[in-house]
Every structure is written in C-alpha cells, then in structure tokens.
Amino acid sequence: MKKAVIIGRDLSLGYPKGDTQKLILEGLDFELNAGELTCLLGPNGVGKSTLIKGILGDLPAWKGELTIQGTNVSNIPNLELAKKLSVVLTEPTFPGNMTVSQLVSLGRTPHTGWSGKLDKTDKEQVEKALDLTKIGYLKDERITEISDGQRQKAMIARALAQDGEIMILDEPTAHLDLVNRYEIMHLLQEICHQEQKAILVVTHDLEIALETADRFWLLNCGIPLISGLPEELVLSGKINSLLPGDKFHFDPEKGKIEKKALPPSWEIIGDPSSVFWIQKALLKRQIPSLDQVIEVKNTPFQIKFNGKIFDSLESFFENLKI
Ligand SMILES: Nc1ncnc2c1ncn2[C@@H]1O[C@H](COP(=O)(O)OP(=O)(O)OP(=O)(O)O)[C@@H](O)[C@H]1O
C-alpha cells in the first residue's frame, strides 16, 4: 500500500506581477509516495522549479491545496518543515574552507538547536549519510578540493543527514558527466528503496530517468500533470507529451528520443548491432534511400556496396558523396 507524503489537489501557483498575477501552474493533482523515486520532467520554463518552490512553502498556493504528511504546507513552521524535508538545489553554495564531514554535519542544524553541537545521534546520522552516499573516504577532504560529482554526493549526504522522510533535488546532475549522472541517480534510487524515503528529482535526463525512476511526473503547458510508471507512459505514448510539435518522437523500441523521419528505403545485411549503427549514421546524414544493398561484416570491419569494399564507415560515406 502506497503512503503519500505530499499531496497536491487542484493546485495553482504563480508570481505577483505589479497589480496583476502571473499564473504559471493550474489545477495540478499529484501524490509523492514514500519509497518511490519520482522524476519530474518537462520542457524549460514550464514551471518545475515553481512547483518545487510551492512544495517548499516559498510560494503560497493561489488555489487548491498542498499538504505535507497531512498538514497544509503554509501551516508548517520552518523548523518543522526542515525536519521533514531536505533539499538539494542546482547551484550549491557553501563556505569553501569546509571539509566534507563539516558540510554533511550542517544537515543536522534543524535538530541541534542554537548551539550547533552534535550529540551521539547527530554524529551517527552524519556517519550513516556518509556511508549511504559511499563518500566516507572523503570526509576529511576540503569540499573545494574534490570533484563536481563527489561534491554533489556530499550535498546529497548533507540532505540525508537532515533525516527527513522527503528529499527534493532540483537538477542534481546538471553539471556532471554521463558516468556521474548515472551514479548519482542510481545512488538516489538505492537510498530511496533502502530508507523508504520519498524522493523527487527534477531532471532533463530522460534516458537516465527511465533507467532509475519508479514514477514520472510529466509537466507540459496547458495539460494536467501526468503521473505514472515510466514504462506505462512509454507504452501508452503519453511520454510524447514531453515533445510537443511533430519534429521529434519517443521511439519505444530504442527507448530514446528521435527525430521523426519518413521510413527509410535501404537494405542493410549484417549483424543486428552493425545494422543499427549504420542505419543511425544514414539517418543522421539524411540519406533516405539507396538503390543498392549494403553488406556489412565484422572482424575485420568491412562494408560492401555497389561492387566496392570499404574498411571504414567514414570511407563509405566519402564514396557516397562522389
Ligand atoms: N521569481 C519569478 N517571478 C516571476 N516569474 C517567474 C519567477 N521565477 C520564474 N518565473 C517564471 O515562471 C515560469 C516557469 O519558470 P520555472 O523556473 O519554474 O520553469 P522550469 O520548468 O523550472 O524551467 P527550467 O527547466 O528552465 O529550469 C517561467 O515563465 C519564468 O519566467
């Protein structure tokens, strides 16, 4: 049985603009569940960060209701909210001289009172957060002297040390390379399932989100928020709501966004992975048809076309130009 920790009902949010109001999100219904990694996806400017501000109580609901563990967010005092919910923002800020362990300890601030002194439980929570994020070995390093990926893990550890049931991360992998992006999202998935936390991640990384998320929230202009299992949204075609216009579509067989193209008319003979990559290269070069069969062989790589033999894809394409 799912346990919804954040519930939005008919929620509208926006910003005051002079004497008028700039409405950004209207009539949203959603539930964020414990033990689920939820990815919020949508085009630039659709209102993802605005929704996060609403959840954090930084923007009041204009209409509808937003509750956290049953209480309207506007009625939760800041300190209480900080104990329930921790946040990792895109552009982290921190004093440069701090060690990783000191940064993670800051996560205990809502629990330590004015003195900031850590008791036994606080220290245990800091250790646990370092363990869960697998950065214990970095605890004495300065945060200015570690890599971007390690620093992002330290920010996640700080949020974990806060020990709320809910974690919200706004584009936590925005500046990271592919391997670190996968690593961070897998780490969040692991923490979410192991600790039964409700984790909401804003991301533009559809492919990594498909690999890791338990649930998607899709936001797009003029349509209600779509919530569902990622695979279900692919199968139903609803995933295409992320791609307005008719230039791109989500190819369910490849699990990728692709440019829409007329069905090509060439024949390629060879092993499936060679055929796949040669097709991709032909599509990229907008070559819709060839009147001869392409035969491809591996070890050594060879393409036979129009009575000629090419030992690389590059030389094959050079020949097509002539
Ligand atoms: N403080 C603000 N005052 C007025 N309008 C704002 C404010 N912040 C954002 N907006 C507007 O709200 C809309 C949604 O912005 P928001 O940052 O929530 O989008 P987003 O989906 O997070 O975009 P991105 O993917 O680019 O981060 C935009 O039209 C933006 O101009």
Image (spheres, rainbow, N blue to C red):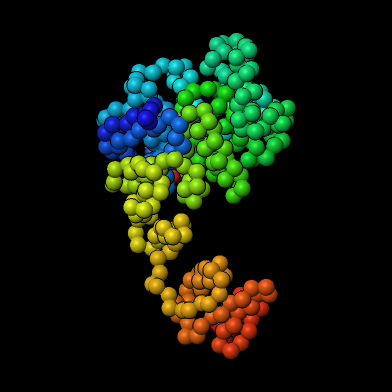
Residue 127 drawn at (x, y percent): 64, 23
Q: What percent of the width, then of the height, locates residue 192?
A: 50, 33
Specify whether 265 is left or right of 114: left
The quadrant of the rendering that contains the N terminus is top left
Q: Eyeballing the image, is 191 above or below 119?
A: below
Q: Quarter-wise, where is residue 296 in the image? A: bottom right
Residue 125's x, y, as percent? 60, 20
Q: Is residue 90 above or below residue 69?
A: below
Instruction: Judge left or right: residue 244 versus residue 98.
Output: left
Q: Residue at x 45, y 31 (%)?
A: 35
Q: Residue 226 appears in which quarter of the rendering?
A: top left
- In the image, ligand 1 is in what quadrant? top left
133 or 172: nearer the viewer = 133
Q: How many marks?
A: 0
Nearer to me, 69 or 307: 307
Which residue is painted at 71% across and 31% down in the image?
138
Q: Is residue 18 visible?
A: no
Classify residue 240 as left or right of residue 88.
left
Residue at screen point 57% across, 32% down: 156
Task: Give coordinates of residue 50: x percent, y percent.
Answer: 39, 36
* Residue 75 visible in the picture: yes
Q: Is residue 180 above or below residue 101?
A: below
* Quadrant in which the C terminus appears: bottom right
| Residue 48 lies in quadrant | top left
User: Which residue shows up at 48% across the image and 28% down it?
Assistant: 196
